[in-house]
Image: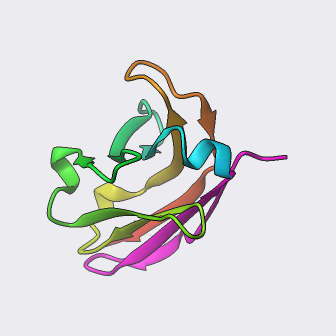
Amino acid sequence: QVPLVESGGGLVQAGGSLRLSCAASGTIFNNYIMGWYRQAPGKERDVVASISISGTTTYADSVKGRFTISRDNAKNTIHLQMNTLKPEDTAVYYCGARRNPWSVDYWGQGTQVTVSS
């Protein structure tokens, strides 16, 4: 069973919006910090946004004011609303679950986001 299942990627023009979703098992959703990460070609995987069990959010500086991470506790799902997308947001986006700051315990399969200029 895949622990994290992402959906919602695609191709969008610059300035547009996309919403990513990540469904998790109840055990993971209720015990792990959930987050979104992205990896562009030739670059490392970096954190984009995270949300704690209590709902506290953090964002990378590059996406502050444009992206919003949220939790749907009834559906064990997190979302990433991405607005005012830029070509530099193009990457494979991964959902991750972690218990500590230095390692991610579970990864989703990734979903491609492509922003055309």
Please state which of residues 72 and 63 is positioned toward the viewer in this rendering.
72
Q: In this rendering, is residue 19 above or below 111?
A: below
Q: Main secondary structure of the magenta part?
A: strand
Please state which of residues 101 and 16 is positioned toward the viewer in this rendering.
101
Residue depicted at 54% across the width and 66% down the height: 21
Expressed as whole percent of the image width and height from the top left, the position of residue 74 reads 56, 70
For the C terminus, give its image quadrant: bottom left
Expressed as whole percent of the image width and height from the top left, the position of residue 47 reads 36, 39
**Marker count (numbered):** 0
From which residue to which does the magenta span run? Answer: 1-25
Colouring scheme applied when the structure was drawn: rainbow
Residue depicted at 21% across the width and 67% down the height: 66
Residue furthest right as drawn? 1
Residue depicted at 19% across the width and 50% down the height: 62
Q: Magenta span has 24?
A: yes
Residue furthest top as drawn? 102
Expressed as whole percent of the image width and height from the top left, the position of residue 36 reads 44, 49
Expressed as whole percent of the image width and height from the top left, the position of residue 101 reads 37, 23
Residue depicted at 66% across the width and 52% down the height: 26
Q: Magenta span has 4?
A: yes
Please state which of residues 18 and 13 is positioned toward the viewer in this rendering.
18
